[in-house]
Image: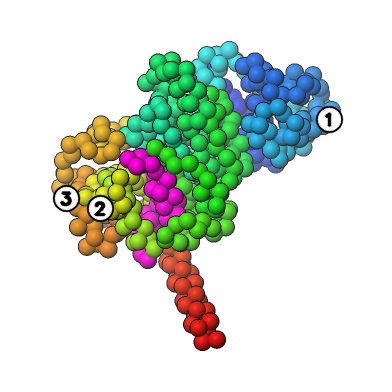
Amino acid sequence: MTATTDIVQKLWNLCHVLRDDGITYLQYVTELTYLLFLKMAQETGVEDQLPQGMRWADLTAKEGIEQLTFYRSLLLELGSKASSLRVQAIFANAQTALKQPRILSKLVESIDKLDWYSAKEEGLGDLYEGLLEKNASEKKSGAGQYFTPRPLIDCMVSLIKPQAGELIQDPAAGTGGFLIAADRYIKQRTDDLFTLSEADQVFQRQQAFYGMELVQDAHRLLLMNMMLHGIEGEVTLGDTLSPDGQRLAKAKVILTNPPFGTKKGGGSPTRDDFTFPTSNKQLVFLQHVYRSLLPEGRAAVVLPDNVLFEDGQGRNIRADLMDKCNLHTILRLPTGIFYAQGVKTNVLFFQRGTTEKGNTKEVWVYDLRTNMPSFGKRIPLMRGHFKEFELAYGDDPNGKSPRTDEGETGRWRCFTREEITKRGNNLDISWLRDESLQSGEDLPEPEEIAAQIMVRLQTAMEEMEALTALLDDEEETETALLE
């Protein structure tokens, strides 16, 4: 066990103490973020970003109710008076969920006693990432929606191959996994940026990575994560599906996992710059991604199955994507790797063309879902599970490496644009026989089956709502003409 793993486990064990104070898992990690920021500022010598009298030593010098009262006022002060705008953003609207002085005292003492020398040697960013991963793996925390499994992120980044000097965007940044993995990938290939010129180093730290996150608690975790990894790029608090998203600069690389579902925060999409308006947030995110790529820019995006098969505007958006981009690869992901039970997902890999038409000639599909186990705590997803797919994908980030169709019994198939057109631009393509359906013993869990039915029903309801809205608009137009 490394020092970082040991520290993460010790910090996580403290949450059991906090549950006695009625604190949720996500509140606990947010609380830890406040306290860890203060301690890490002391350990890394950057306390000049904090006002005098509002630092770790000032907090540890107090006891009991005085300490808790001071802590509450400290959070308010840092959210408004810190000299660093990033510190202000981390503590924006910060409030403690702690009610008992003894709980705060226990947290402060425990954090103070950790092996900070070893943690700094191994990397404070890795420590914080480990804590976020621990939180996301706890289903009761509800934090999984902001956290994409790191083996999947590492697979996507290694195939897209982000390069120094490229603008890299995540329009649904969550806790920053994609941006941090891309930064790590580039640093590993530039001797931690030292092989770059001074100007290029500044660009990498301050401008290369950017994006947007809707939820404030996730945004503060994201900022903390980026800071600990030495990334100063601007990831703003806002809604990509509103006019805020129109202000994001076009990118050479986009890596993202937009939120699933239609009801969580932000209301309906309000962007007016897309050709195909829809209430389906994932389809709106997809439009944002391929329209935000610079010519020959590339993207890898995690999307649920309904984006591949939804009719109406879904069909139009997929056709537009394949016109404007070379959609060269689809990875059908196994079940159980995300917080939303029963949701089936895919990764779309595509490159923006230099013309507006006819860029997709063929689409390669890799089925990593059929006859695969359902991943979760019992069977954790590992990087090794993507090995065969990565070999099939090849070294070229834009899908131009030599590829071999494995036929109807293999996991790797090629479909021409003409074949997809005959399918009504439906990209939900499967061909392998699902052996689990042949035996009642191997059927998915009842809650997974129910969740899959709910996803289909939700899609049908969205299509009915869109049709109703269209009919209402036509009726209003006819009435106006008659008047």
Could you tell me residue 219's position as x and y percent?
59, 39
> Number of labelled discs?
3
Closer to the N terminus: mark 2 or mark 1?
1
Residue in the foreground of this view, choosing between 283 and 119: 283
Q: Amino acid at mark 3?
A: Glu
The vertical placement of 295 against 342, above or below, is: above
Disc 1 secondary structure class: helix
Question: Quadrant of residue 284 in the image?
Answer: bottom left
Residue at 41% x, 32% y is 166
Nearer to us: label 2 or label 3: 2
- CA–CA distance in space, label 2 to label 1: 68 Å
Q: Amino acid at mark 1?
A: Ile
Residue ranking furthest to the right: 66
Q: Which residue is mark 3?
A: 408
Q: Which residue is mark 1?
A: 65
Q: Which residues are magenta?
A: 283-312
Could you tell me residue 399's position as x and y percent?
25, 39
Say whether residue 303 is magenta: yes
Q: Which residue is mark 2?
A: 358
Tell me the crowding category of disc 2: few under 14, some 14 to 19, or many 20 or more residues within 10 angstroms, Cα based: some
Closer to the N terminus: mark 2 or mark 3?
2
**Does any portion of residue 75 appear in the rendered image?**
no
Circle number at residue 327: none
Residue at 50% x, 58% y is 272
